[in-house]
Amino acid sequence: MASTTPIDIPPAPPAERRRPTSTGRVGDKVFLGLSRGSGILLLVIMAAIAVFLSYRAVIALSKNEGNFLTTFDWNPAGNPPVFGIAVLLFGTVVSSIIAMVIAVPIAVGIALFISHYAPRKIAAPLAYVIDLLAAVPSIVYGIWGALVLVPYLEGLNLWLDQFFGWTYLFEKTEVGVARSLFTVGILLAIMILPIVTSVSREVFLQVPKMNEEAALALGATRWEVIRLSVLPFGRSGIISASMLGLGRALGETMAVATVLSPSFLISLHVLNPGGGTFAQNIAAKFDEANELGRDALIASGLVLFVLTLLVNGAARLIIARRKEYSGANA
């Protein structure tokens, strides 16, 4: 019987991950150059904005006699000038939190209804209306809020004070119309609702059909399919959509200025009239401010700029940590 000699087959070399290169076509080179140039231009613009805000903020801070982060007064025209951003930071954060708490769950529910529950004849017009609401100017929302929302919220404020006043947050201790941070939060929630809904709907529509069909084949109900396949796949998209809405809530100007009754007081009673936000304060006082006052307003704008960067950076970190799960890569 003939003997066979085993043949050693050398292992295949490990595959190296290569960055896609240009094919040499003119169109590819042009597209690569435009893409790279756009990214660099964006970084240059962001750096220019940061340098301008920092330069004007240093001028104001060098003449400020109060603590910029904790002083509750805003009087750049005084002698000595005093201005702080504690009240503005508090009002901006509180009103944005209220808006996110109200808008995000409703937006996700609407997006799920359009993408997985509604018949096509209803889903298409409803999606169109949602997209159309995102294009409504903020001043229109502000006028509607001042003429309709503020008067009708009086009854809701009294009801919250009666049944939830023990929480301290919903205790109404001052008499006045509903021009409060709570009203601003509701108005901002209505404004960011179309944005969060539209982005979340598009993310849910990208869920691989194989994942949903596999879950249905295993006997899962429609809600179980959404809970086990759709929501985990779209978690990063929901976070991104929420951050887009939060960015608009943080920087909203005219709608807030139309509805809010500004005051430099920090109070956890969100139903009381008063409060203030960065954008509203800048819009209200920029025209009448002197040179130092404008520098002070720009300094407060720098704080809003940094706050927005921190929020978006935190969102990117959350998305990166969730990146290990992706239904598309399964």
Image (tube, rainbow, N blue to C red):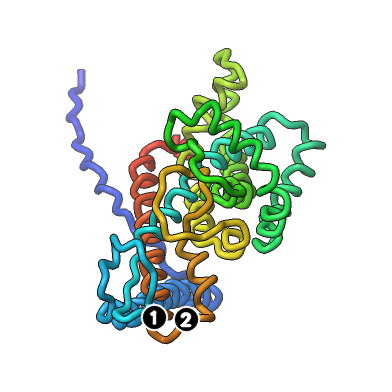
- Disc number at residue 77? 1
Foreground pick, 255 / 152: 152
Which residue is the site of mark 2?
A: 289
Foreground pick, 290 / 58: 290
Give the quarter of the figure containing the N terminus: top left
User: Given the image, on which type of amino acid does mark 1 rest?
Assistant: Ala
Classify mark 1: residues with Cα within 10 Å, few (<14), some (14-19) or many (20+): some
Single out the mark in the foreground, 2 or 1: 1
Q: Residue at x 44, y 48 (%)?
A: 94
Foreground pick, 5 / 300: 300
Q: Quadrant of residue 214?
A: top right
> How far across and how far down the image is residue 299, in percent?
36, 73
In the depicted structure, whether residue 22 falls above or below residue 129: below
Q: Residue at x 41, y 48 (%)?
A: 267
Label 2, label 1: how many angstroms apart (C-alpha)?
Answer: 8 Å
Q: Can residue 199 be seen from the camera position used here? A: no
Query: Are dots 2 and 1 in contact, CB under 8 Å?
Result: yes
Horizontal side, residue 144 vs residue 90: left or right: right
Q: Residue at x 36, y 39 (%)?
A: 324
In the depicted structure, whether residue 237 falls above or below residue 296: above
> How far across and how far down the image is residue 314, in percent?
35, 51
User: Given the current orientation, which residue lies at the most extreme bottom position?
Assistant: 291
Classify mark 2: residues with Cα within 10 Å, few (<14), some (14-19) or many (20+): some
User: Given the image, on which type of amino acid does mark 2 rest?
Assistant: Ala
- Disc number at residue 268? none
> How far across and how far down the image is residue 186, in percent?
59, 45
Horizontal side, residue 313 vs residue 160: left or right: left
